[in-house]
Image (tube, coloured by chain):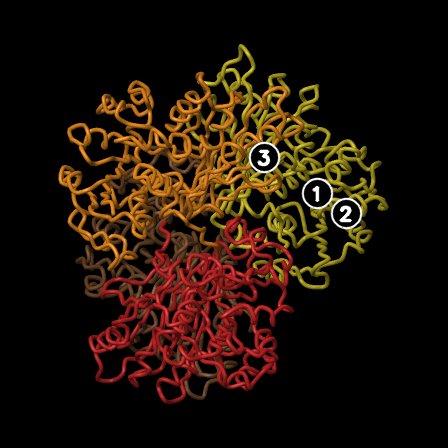
Chain colours: A yellow, B orange, C red, D brown
Amino acid sequence: MIKVGIVGATGYTGQELVRLLLPHPDARIECLTSNSYRGKKFSSVFPAFESLVDLELMSTDDLAEIIERCDFVFFALPHGIAAGLLKDQALAETRVIDLGADFRLRNARDYQVWYQLEHPWPEGLSKSVYGLSEWRRDRIREATIVANPGCYATSVELALLPLAEAGLLGDTIVDAKSGVSGAGRSASIDTHFNECNESIKAYKVAAHRHTPEIEQELGSFAGQQKRITFTPHLIPIQRGILSTIYCSLPEGVGIDEIRSLYRESYASEPFVRLLEDRQSPETRWVAGTNYCDLSINIDERTDRLIIISALDNLIKGAAGQAIQNMNIMSNFDETKGLSLLPRFP
Amino acid sequence: MIKVGIVGATGYTGQELVRLLLPHPDARIECLTSNSYRGKKFSSVFPAFESLVDLELMSTDDLAEIIERCDFVFFALPHGIAAGLLKDQALAETRVIDLGADFRLRNARDYQVWYQLEHPWPEGLSKSVYGLSEWRRDRIREATIVANPGCYATSVELALLPLAEAGLLGDTIVDAKSGVSGAGRSASIDTHFNECNESIKAYKVAAHRHTPEIEQELGSFAGQQKRITFTPHLIPIQRGILSTIYCSLPEGVGIDEIRSLYRESYASEPFVRLLEDRQSPETRWVAGTNYCDLSINIDERTDRLIIISALDNLIKGAAGQAIQNMNIMSNFDETKGLSLLPRFP
Amino acid sequence: MIKVGIVGATGYTGQELVRLLLPHPDARIECLTSNSYRGKKFSSVFPAFESLVDLELMSTDDLAEIIERCDFVFFALPHGIAAGLLKDQALAETRVIDLGADFRLRNARDYQVWYQLEHPWPEGLSKSVYGLSEWRRDRIREATIVANPGCYATSVELALLPLAEAGLLGDTIVDAKSGVSGAGRSASIDTHFNECNESIKAYKVAAHRHTPEIEQELGSFAGQQKRITFTPHLIPIQRGILSTIYCSLPEGVGIDEIRSLYRESYASEPFVRLLEDRQSPETRWVAGTNYCDLSINIDERTDRLIIISALDNLIKGAAGQAIQNMNIMSNFDETKGLSLLPRFP
Amino acid sequence: MIKVGIVGATGYTGQELVRLLLPHPDARIECLTSNSYRGKKFSSVFPAFESLVDLELMSTDDLAEIIERCDFVFFALPHGIAAGLLKDQALAETRVIDLGADFRLRNARDYQVWYQLEHPWPEGLSKSVYGLSEWRRDRIREATIVANPGCYATSVELALLPLAEAGLLGDTIVDAKSGVSGAGRSASIDTHFNECNESIKAYKVAAHRHTPEIEQELGSFAGQQKRITFTPHLIPIQRGILSTIYCSLPEGVGIDEIRSLYRESYASEPFVRLLEDRQSPETRWVAGTNYCDLSINIDERTDRLIIISALDNLIKGAAGQAIQNMNIMSNFDETKGLSLLPRFP
């Protein structure tokens, strides 16, 4: 039984970690922190956990103690904080999975450009591994710090890495749509029910921070620099990301070849599902699960690939993948605690 | 005061025509048909019209009488029906605005390919005019039959015709998102609340019937054949289409030039609004109105134009544009009856 | 043409006043205030009003000037502010419609009990009239200050005053359900999309501030003190209140008698619609309109009346009724500017 | 390992049974039927079950075989069918849990009055037990046929039986609000997204079929006939019922006494949670779980009890309670397979 701590347990991602770890057969929740609610019981913030998780919420000031007591510490904090906190901690026996952005970019200058912030601990980058479970499994297994990928990034990378690795990734446009939980739990006009219900908009057009992360990983597997166009949209659902991705079809390559490539890439992956020819991913079939559903389509009139990817931003795009990584790091069965079915309807 | 009839008055589009025409100062609703509810009062189907529109619903069998009594007849029927009905009617004084698909494609063979149906009245095509108000005003003014554009088509054509006409339209991808009213009022599993709420999906990938219509108009203004990739999505809102459109930026052309082009194109248009640099269209600001909001963006990292277009599928994408066309055909002020503000929140 | 000012123009109610007054044929919007956005253009806060309402937002500090310039001033502020502001102003030619709670209760002590605040200007109460249009028309016509009723209160009073006036109102329970716009535009966890979507709850059980207002009016028309049980609920829609009201049926009185009573009470009222026997009010048929729909039902097994009332909380429950009152005070046709149809779907 | 069959597996309730039984440690899904989809794989109807439940859907014509092969057969069919099917079957070793209405009313005449249908098998009623788990545990344990209670009925009975049993239940009004999944999966105008989203209505006012079922159980525990007023409402959420229940407070009894009574009644119940004084049930905290949350409030101004009850209509109101009953009948731990947490957000 491993002991886990969650720093930032009362945001949506932190709370989802608690919910998914609670029934995990080999993990026990040992410490939770929340600077907004410190001193309160976790179950007083989220009444569904009454009598199930009554731990008192600690402060991030107690980090040394938490590291001392836990085998794994998950960080679910806004960017810029985790790296600063970890800088001065000796991890020794403890391993870290950071669900924020601090360890995702390999290059501290990219971080500064995209996050408008000097990286708090550039040396930490070399101690960390990018945690896209299906594609970095071996390095994740040994890592001390795992940078859990962004939600959009997971959705896009799972959809494109087979092409990138095969040297077949051409010009790429990503049109992504996310539910509101992606915006976090802080109260704001933008996430007010009346302001986002019954509407759709694009935001951060050509400027979203998951762009460099996606390009870094595509480039890493392609062996050459990649640039993509990425447009996120906000839609009035609670959970789910659907990415519709347009790629030029490499000359002389047919759709059957592409489909074979994907089947091979994901043949033994428990959490990536390739849909049949005529089926199209829908977020409702992945919401509440750790699955990423993919379909590979071709527009024959324009010779363009259309790859569609659906996942739950809080699970496969955050807490679920983090637990998958914990399982990998612990040599547990990778699906442990993650056999989730969507709630329908 | 012109007299209008609506054939197919109890679908969403037909009902919206009634709602918008009712306060129109120079039009009077004279006849309504509905084969599903024939013989009933319109207000018994839509209780909000109690005492306002108590007309008895006629049958399409009464078409000759309707044409006799009305100056304008709007058709709001599934494709394949209007052309068949009109084939044998002498229109004489009466003018027709068809909100279905029967008169949109100039070429009966395209119709057969995309609608899997032999065109019921190919000769009728030459009597009809494609009714995108802002771009076909002169021909609409004289037309006997106006083919009101599709909802997606309106959204995309308004966004791209300035580029097409200027010879600057390159490779184009359209990623469109529509609310559920686009699917019509028939009961089906796909539009069941529990099946489409809290989810998003693409549908008819690379196969939607608005594709040839958009290509026809882009090609017509560009003076050369155009092919686009078009992917529609269903999202859980009632009204609204947001189209996010990706075009390669023509070499040597800057974003400022493009913006000037659009400003000129739409300078005197009452219903097309160009948003400022940093604003992004949201369907909530056009829902319930006849506006189409556009923003012109550039992804400087990939030299790609991103044009975003928002409109209300039932108004600017259907009933509103039809009334705008009626105003044009009647030499009324084009905005008559269409000074609508969105309901917010 | 009367000149109107709106103090607090950027909340949902203030914005709705602007939207409804803009097309009003005999009123012109002269001044708008907003302490949150002072100095900005109204249309920069609500982009739908671009080029339509570009007035610069003033501060409440400019109240004297506003009163000087306007014939009518609407106040759409949280309770406790309007009365304080008005205390020191000479109204002279200007008349006030307060959409807040400061002038609704006739008794300053009740105000203190329910609002936990000493009334800022008890003397002002005698200068004001409770503005339920259908029931206080004559006094409203002469009033200097009209206290526009609360949204729940309007919904319940219109449903019960015929009974109260006839001396037939017995034991009464009100179970009311409201959309989220009733909670106002301030960002808060409770109105965050993810926190209120896909859920329903009761709130302020037996403690909501509209209770004494309802009891005051029922008592006033009944000629004796009335006590009700009132439970509001929050549901995930934007607009609309449905109140389901349970009353003991007075002995010896039948449902037909009750229905006759209501038909007489509301025979000539343009905005109160009595639905037929088998129809039930739905908020979608009143949302966006100034109507209140009522149905009168009986549970024959328990001899209990069930009266159901539906209205739009921002229109008949706020801005619409305020304009109706302005029309009354100005001797305009009462429906002027209020011929609104619901947007469907 | 017990073997279970589900007759009617492709409705919302049937599908939910599959979803909940799949991870049950001591049950195995053996047979599924669906007359709409017979011959297809279950996973082809519900893609989320791909590779998890690929059983071919049988027909109800195969019922004898299903009974032969299964230890438990769940029926999830519209009323009137299950009793007819079971009439001619020898159950022998097999036990039945019927989630429809056929075995709920003890009296075949009541069934005829409320369901407008002659009961297909009146003799079957004496072989069946009403399956409200918390209140009929001993009889359920021995039963051959369990009549699983209606969703509204469960919500109301759990909220009122402590009072009824103590002889303290006075005059009672139930105002209930349900999500759309309660209406089942058949396509209809009423459940069309555009027709029920953004609206609320009451339906079957004083005429809903769960009324006699509730009255029967209240009467049975009270030892005297009980009549209630019951008004269901439809609200635009997928899952969840909130019942707000108004009872006259028995003379001389205080709120503390009532709360003690409830605490005693439910002290050892794993699935009924009494909320503290100031907390109010919200459907989001029970959706996806087998919990029923209750709060006991008093309106001190009118001496009226307000009891609020929240549950998930498809789980505690249907499939979850059915599995709870199966656990009871099998002498399993009652919570087996039912340790569910709500998905939040």
Q: Which mark is residue A100?
A: 1
For badge 3, the amino acid type reads Thr
The answer to the question of whether label 1 and label 2 lie on touching residues, with beta carbons closer than 8 A, is yes
Q: Mark on residue A274?
A: none
**Chain on which label 3 sits:** A
Query: In the shown orientation, is residue A91 left or right of residue B194?
Result: right
N-term mark: 3 or 1: 1
Residue A167 or residue D58, whichever sits in front: A167
Q: Mark 1: which amino acid?
A: Gly
Label 2 crowding class (10 Å Cα cut-off): few <14, some 14-19, many 20+? some
The location of residue D88, given as percent across then percent down, is: 21, 49
- Estimate the spatial distance between the alpha carbons at disc 2 and disc 3, rounded to whole Å: 26 Å
| Chain of the residue on which disc 1 is drawn | A
The residue wearing badge 3 is A231
In the figure, residue C140 lies in which quadrant? bottom left
For label 3, the crowd category at 10 Å Cα-Cα, with few meaning under 14, some 14 to 19 and many 20 or more, is: many
Marks 1 and 2 sit apart, C-alpha to C-alpha, by 9 Å
Secondary structure of the residue carrying tag 2 is loop
The part of the image, by quadrant, that contains residue C256 is bottom left
Q: Secondary structure at mark 3?
A: strand
Q: Report the mark closest to the observer, 2 or 3.
A: 3
Q: Is residue B285 above or below residue B81?
A: below
